[in-house]
Amino acid sequence: MSDGRVTGESAPPASEIVTAEDVADAHERLDGVVHRTPLDSSRTIAGRCGAERVDLKLENVQRTGSFKIRGAYNAMAQLPESVRERGVVASSAGNHAQGVALAGDLLGIDTTIVVPEITPAVKIDATRGYGADVVVEGDLYEESYEHALRLADEEGLEFVHPFDDAAVIAGQGTVGRELAADAPDVDTVLVSIGGGGLISGIATALKARDPDVRVVGVQPEGAAHAKPSLEADEIRMLSEVDTVAEGIADARLLERTFAVVRDRVDDVVSVDDADLAVATAVLAERAKTVAEPAGAAPVAALLSGAVDVEGERVAAVVSGGNVGLSEHAELTRVGMEALGRAAEARLETDGWPAVLGDLSEAVAASGAELDSVERAARTAADEPNRVPVEVRLDGSGPDHLADALDSLAALDGVEVVSHSLDERVGESGDSA
């Protein structure tokens, strides 16, 4: 496998890769194909990060649930008929797969998609639903990528790259073109970075209109390759990636995206998986929108303080919402715990299930909610003559939950052995 090494000196000029005119052409090509997604203001997020205004560009409500249809369609619509007849192949962790599959369906092109084993079932099912042939190959995206290239060579298929392609970048840039029109006074725009196609296109569109607008990339700490590459002025590839945000779990930039990001992106910051969970929870509760972790990364950067936007007018691109309901529920739960809005506790009680009524009444009297209660598996640390019980509580904040736990501890025959509240709040700071 090639290490994709490109230095600053050998990288092509960004102006030779993609221009604002290319984005404008893509905008015309995509007319009637993609949704012009809404720009939704969030006073809650603005208040928590100190910004004058925060707008959310909701690409999670785009067709296929992410921005990827923009680039895929723009690239595939320009293929000559002889290439269309043979079909295309692509590699993807999920969202590009759906974009290529839908574009193929709309354009009458047969599509084969290679996905890594980490791809969520919801994305695989959706891709097949658009008529694509899905091949699961490789533990990591890089292995799926190499397999797709082999298929292209062996079967004469056109490979549609998920990000390192000028037409794909131009298509993704239409997100930035819409932002520039809908928020002409924006100071800073935050965009997730996986392979860099989305931020390359958005930065191209925004910088052409206003060179002073700040474009900031956001990556998970477990896949943070862009900033080291920019600092070294050459592409750096990670030996492994480890993040809940599988949609941006790429190991490197490539030649075109490296060149454009280096020229047009002002900064790159990183967030950890706990920050992503918090952002997912806040978006669900306050913005009433479902985001996958990759799509929530820009909001995570705002909420965690990874980027200073004090007094600024900010836009965060929520790039995708393709997440299974169970996974989303787990993420929001983790996020609520990190915010001090939820807690788990282990109790020792004198009896089961007689204690259930007392537990329920005590939590209700405190104004908190009893999310779940169940008898726990006994461990060597438990008193043999007492019954271990685990409870999950929801409340308005850490003080509220602490009061609820105190109410449980005050019950006869109940002891609170441990709880998650102190640890979670200590890690994440003040509650929301």
Image (cartoon, grey):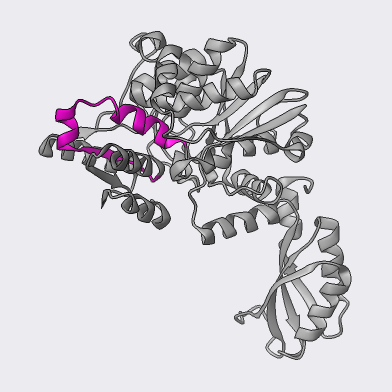
Pinpoint residue 58: horizontal percent, then vertical percent.
58, 38
Where 407 falls versus 201 (above or below)? below
Left/right placement of residue 98 relative to residue 286 reads left
Left/right placement of residue 216 relative to residue 263 reads right
Pinpoint residue 217: horizontal percent, then vertical percent.
54, 27
Question: Which residue does the image show at 24% across and 26% down from the upper left?
Answer: 79
Pinpoint residue 297: horizontal percent, then vertical percent.
57, 38
Residue 25 on the magenta span? no
Q: Residue furthest front?
A: 32
Question: Which residue does the image show at 76% across and 37% down from the upper left?
Answer: 43
Q: What stretch of residues is rendered in magenta?
A: 67-94
Quarter-of-image position of residue 343:
bottom right
**Residue 137 visible in image:** no
Left/right placement of residue 56 relative to residue 4 reads right
Where 182 falls versus 362 (above or below)? above
**Residue 281 visible in image:** yes
Question: Which residue does the image show at 38% across and 52% down from the upper left?
Answer: 126
Quarter-of-image position of residue 27:
top left
Q: In the depicted view, which residue is nearer to us: 338 or 208?
A: 208
Left/right placement of residue 316 relative to residue 78 reads right
Residue 75 on the magenta span? yes
Q: In the depicted view, which residue is nearer to us: 175 or 356?
A: 175
How many numbered discs, if any? 0
